[in-house]
Image: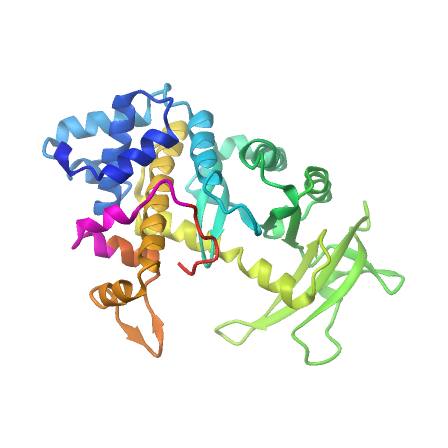
Amino acid sequence: MPEYSKPTRLVEYINSALSTQHGHRRNAIADFVIALIEIKSGSQAALARGFDNFEAAVKRLSRLLHNPKLELEASVLAHALWLVARLPRSGPIRIAIDWTSEDTQHLLVASLIFGRRAIPLFWRAYDGAALKDRMREYEHALMTTLVEKVLDGITARRVLITCDRGFGDVTTLDLLDTLGVGYIIRAKGNVKVDLDGAWRKLNAVRFRTNQRRRSLGRVRYCAGSPRRVYLTHARARDRTGRWGIWYLISNRRLKAEAACREYARRFGCEEGFRDSKRMLGFAKARIRNIDAWSRMFLLVAIALVVLVGIGIGLLRDPDRLKRLLREVRSRRRGRSELSLVRAVTELLEHDESLWHLFDCRAKFNLGLCL
């Protein structure tokens, strides 16, 4: 890949976000992020084929991914702090925390929600053997670092964390209360709550009418070690017509509709994982070393920041956006088969001038629909 082809805005972003890294490493990161966006594959061989000298590119990428001087915790934290510095000064900051896995390798990721999408904010990687009896410990460590270091300077009341059923342990609730942040977590159906003076399993709680959601107020949660939480009961039919049930617990008093709407935003992290694995090809990264695998995910996370940034730039010019989208996607019954993030990757193949829409000094609008 010729040196002159590197977009200036991307280099400026990497130089500011990873300023403590050596210039050669920053240049390599910029080159391989561009290759990742163009080739859409986490395979080292596939990425190297995008360069003039295949063998040199393979060695360069391998050196970057296995270089201990590209210290993981510091690099991921620098990436996260750069993002946080560009968040709006008011309004909610929504974070979804979840695990994602490839074979025996696992990532615990805190994702920043942008409308209907999410991008990785902070993460840690683990081998499957390291997770035995320690998952809760790792989750609590990430949450503590996230709030105390990554979001330092952000008022805790602005932060709302959403998690799926695996995070509904009472020790997790205690930790989030201690950290002062809000949470909405989907509880497991076999957990008991104190309703009408009796302990009942959540999956035994029934709707009395045809209502879809209701707030059950502040209740005692978990018979073995009770905690006071706000409980919301909701249901909806999936595409096959089967009922899906949500039992949502929170430390904030929200109306049932608001609680469900906030929890539904959590699925943006699932879309973010899909963007990482399928659209950018992280699922094809066959890297045994867990640290090298996590460094590859750093390249993916940077690529997603760039794509979201270009998308935000396009949204500032609706007429141009509408005209460009006609080139890469069709519309059926008023809906598009492509997200804006995916559309940007397709548009960059035809119009390299779009790179200039990425402004690394601009604030991110978290409410935009991506």
Q: Position of residue 114 (x, y in %)?
A: 46, 53
Q: Residue at x 29, y 27 (%)?
A: 26
Whether residue 1 is visible to the viewer of this picture, yes or no, is no
Q: Residue at x 31, y 46 (%)?
A: 358
Depicted 54 relative to depicted 220: above or below: above
Find the residue positioned furthest to the left: 52
Classify residue 361 by image quadrant. Answer: top left
State the count of labels: 0
Q: Position of residue 194 (x, y in %)?
A: 83, 58
Q: Position of residue 79 (x, y in %)?
A: 42, 34
Residue nearer the viewer, 29 or 185:
29
Quadrant containing the C terminus in the rendered view: bottom left
Task: Locate residue 106 relative to residue 219 in the image: left or right.
Answer: left
Residue nearer the viewer, 249 or 44:
249
Depicted 70 relative to depicted 265: above or below: above
Whether residue 311 is visible to the viewer of this picture, yes or no, is yes
Q: Residue at x 70, y 55 (%)?
A: 249
Task: Locate residue 134 relative to residue 7 in the image: left or right.
Answer: right
Span shown in magenta: 346-362
User: Is 56 in the magenta?
Assistant: no
Residue nearer the viewer, 238 or 334:
334
Quadrant containing the N terminus in the rendered view: top left
